[in-house]
Structure formats: C-alpha cells, structure tokens
Amino acid sequence: MYEVIRWIVSGLLGMAFLVVAAFNWWTVLRRSVDGPSTAPLLGGALGVASLCVCPLEGSKWYLWIPLLADYGSIPYFVLVVREVFRTQKRS
C-alpha cells in the first residue's frame, strides 16, 4: 500500500513539474520580458521532489534532470548571473 501511495504522489508531483516547466518554456519562447516564472525553481523543485518520492530504484541518480529541463531553474539563474556580470562590466 505504501508503494502505491508513493507512485501516486510521485505522479502528481511529476505532472505538476511538467505543467510548470512547460509554462516556463512557453514564456521564454514567446519572448516575455517578465522572465520565465513568478516562482523560479518551483518547476525544478517539483521535479526533484517527484524523483525523491518515486519508488523506482536508481531514480535518485536523475535528480539533476528537472533542474536543467525547467527554464526557471538552473538555465535561468545562469542567464541572470551572466547579465549581472555584463552590466557590471559596462559600468
């Protein structure tokens, strides 16, 4: 029974990750000036949580994938750091 609950929770978190990540990428592709998300890291955190709860053995080796797949996570912060350095260089 416990494993079934873990599958359900993992699936729900995974679906939430897909929705947030898709929204973040949609925002980027339509070139919104507001940024990828109102809550950066939310999609990546949902994906990581989904893999942490997942009962499949070895799923924890892939915890880094949601953080790279969601534009509001690592890719966004890399661009923010790059932009900060670029604006400091101009000053």
Image: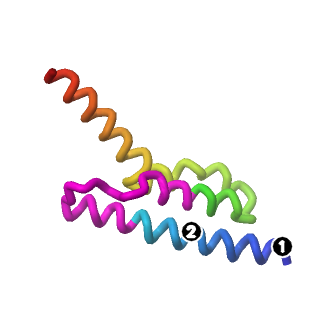
Q: Which residue is mark 1?
A: 2
Total marks shown come to 2
Identify the residue at the far right of this view: 1
Please tell me whether mark 1 sits on a helix, a strand or a loop: helix
Residue drawn at (43%, 66%), measured in percent from left and top?
20
The x, y position of residue 58, in whole percent, is 71, 54
The x, y position of residue 86, in whole percent, is 21, 28
Q: Going by the image, does 3 lie left or right of 24?
A: right
Q: Which residues are magenta?
A: 22-47
Residue drawn at (74%, 70%), measured in percent from left and top?
6
Q: Which residue is mark 2?
A: 14
Amino acid type indicated by mark 2: Gly
Q: CA distance from mark 1 to mark 2?
A: 18 Å
Dividing the image into 4 quarters, which one contains the C terminus?
top left
Please tell me whether mark 2 sits on a helix, a strand or a loop: helix
Residue 37 magenta: yes
Q: Residues within 10 Å of mark 1 (few under 14, many from 20)?
A: few
Dividing the image into 4 quarters, which one contains the N terminus?
bottom right
Would you identify the image quadrant in which residue 34 lies? bottom left
